[in-house]
Amino acid sequence: MRPVLHGDVVAAARVLLCVPEVRRGRVMAELLRAADLADRYRRVTGRVHPDFGTGSLLAASAAWTRQDEPALDDPEYLDCLVAVLVALRRRVARPARHADGRAGPCVTATRGR
């Protein structure tokens, strides 16, 4: 899958708004698989996948019915955004940590330099 941008998250959340809550996890997994498939297809053939597009999550979402984007005070939309972010977070490896538990690699900020 191509790098995920804000528009990808919004597009996937708009898809999830159109499916029952109990199916959202499965649909999100299908969106991720479609984006992965399309990205591999694009890299191998040099062409856009005919069903799932360029390999972005936004392009994969275009194959699904999407609700117009609601305002961020809509609790169901917020739940869908969280579901997308959680699914994406599960795909990303944890960063290395220092012996004292800090995330790394870290650069210490210095004042006045």
Image (cartoon, rainbow, N blue to C red):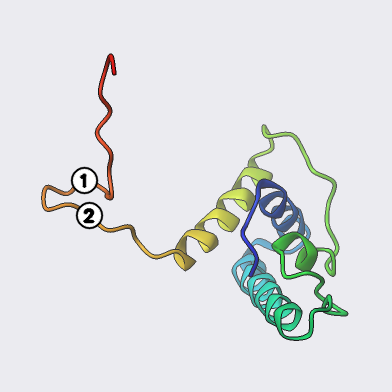
**Alpha-carbon neighbours of circle 1 within 10 Å: few (<14), some, or many (≥20)?**
few
Q: Residue at x 11, y 53 (%)?
A: 99
Mark before the other along the chain sequence, 1 or 2:
2
Mark 1: amino acid? Arg
* Residue 73 position (above or below residue 51): above
> At numbered mark 1, what does the secondary structure look like: helix, strand or loop?
loop
Q: Is residue 64 left or right of residue 55?
A: right
Residue 111: percent from the left, percent from the top? 26, 17
Task: Establish if 75 lies above or below 46.
Answer: above
Left or right for 27, reference 64: left
Quarter of the rendering occupied by the C terminus: top left
Q: Secondary structure at mark 2?
A: loop
Q: Which residue is at 72% across, 70% downward? A: 55
* Residue underneath mark 2: 97
Name the residue at the top extreme.
112
Q: Which residue is mark 1?
A: 102
Alpha-carbon span between mark 1 and mark 2 = 6 Å
Q: Quadrant of residue 69?
A: top right
> Which residue type does callout 2 highlight?
Arg
Q: Quadrant of the N terminus?
A: bottom right
Asked if disc 1 and disc 2 are in contact, CB closer than 8 Å, the reply is yes
Residue appearing at x 77%, y 39% in the figure: 70
Q: Is residue 94 above or below residue 79?
A: below
